[in-house]
Image (cartoon, helix red, strand yellow):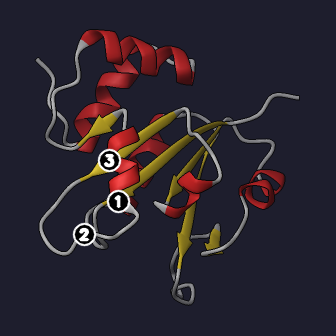
Amino acid sequence: MSFPKIIVIAGDHSNIGKTTLAYKLCELLANAVRIKIGHHPRKEHGAEHYYYAGATFAEILSDHRGCSYLIIESNQILSQVKPDCLIFLTGQGPVKPSAATAINAADIIRGKYVDEVRQECIARALNIDRTTVKKMIEFSGEQLQ
C-alpha cells in the first residue's frame, strides 16, 4: 500500500487564498483530496473533509489512504508531519504565530523566485513532471523566469 503525497498550504494569516489554491491543486493533481483544518465550526457549504485543530495526522491519513495526494490547508499540521511540498502564501495583515516555522521550511513562497533545481526537487518529491510543478508555482503566485 502506498501513502499519499502530502502538500501543505500554509499562510501568514487567514483569508489569504489557501482554499482557492487548494481547489486549483485538486483540479491539477489526479486523485487529490483537499483537507481543511480549522478552529471554527465547519461552514454549511465548507470543506467536505474538515478537521478541527488538534486532529492528528494519523487520523487524517487513516481516513484518506486511497488518495494520491493530500492537500492540507494548515500551519499547525507542520508540527506533526514533514510534507512532500510546503507552499506558503504571504499577504498583508497580522501574522499568525505558526507562520514563522512554515515560511522557513517552505518549498514555494508566494512572490519568490523558484529556480530550476528546486522545481526538479519538487517534481521528484511529488512524482510529477516539471510542467505540473510550474503550474503549481504559478497558481501559488510565485515567480518563474
Tell whether 42 sits left or right of 13.
right
Residue beneath disc 2: 95
Quadrant that contains the N terminus: top right
The amino acid at mark 2 is: Val
Q: Amino acid at mark 1?
A: Ala
Circles 1 and 3: CB atoms closer than 8 Å: yes
The x and y percentages for residue 40 are 51, 88
Can you say whether 123 is above or below 48 in the image?
Answer: above
Residue at (70% x, 36% y) in the render? 4
Q: Position of residue 44 (x, y in %)?
A: 53, 88
State whether residue 41 is above or below residue 75: below
Q: Is residue 5 visible?
A: yes
Q: According to the image, label 3 marks what residue?
A: 103
* Separation (CA) of disc 2 from disc 1: 7 Å
> Looking at the image, which residue sits at the far right?
1
Instruction: Tell me whether circle 2 and circle 1 mark residues in contact (CB < 8 Å).
Output: yes
Q: CA distance from mark 1 to mark 3?
A: 6 Å
Q: Residues within 10 Å of mark 1 (few under 14, many from 20)?
A: some
Of helix, strand and loop, which one carries label 3? helix
Q: Secondary structure at mark 2?
A: loop
Question: Image point 76% across, 51% down: which residue?
Answer: 61
Picture quarter with the C terminus: top left
**Residue 121 occupies quadrant:** top left
Q: CA distance from mark 3 to mark 2?
A: 11 Å
Which sits in the foreground, 78 or 42? 78
Q: Which residue is mark 1?
A: 99
Upstream in the sequence, badge 3 or badge 2?
2
Q: Is residue 20 visible?
A: no
Nearer to me, 9 or 65: 9
In the image, what residue type sits under mark 3?
A: Ile
What residue is drawn where x is 27% and y is 41%?
139
Q: Measured from the top left, where is residue 116 in percent x and y?
A: 27, 10
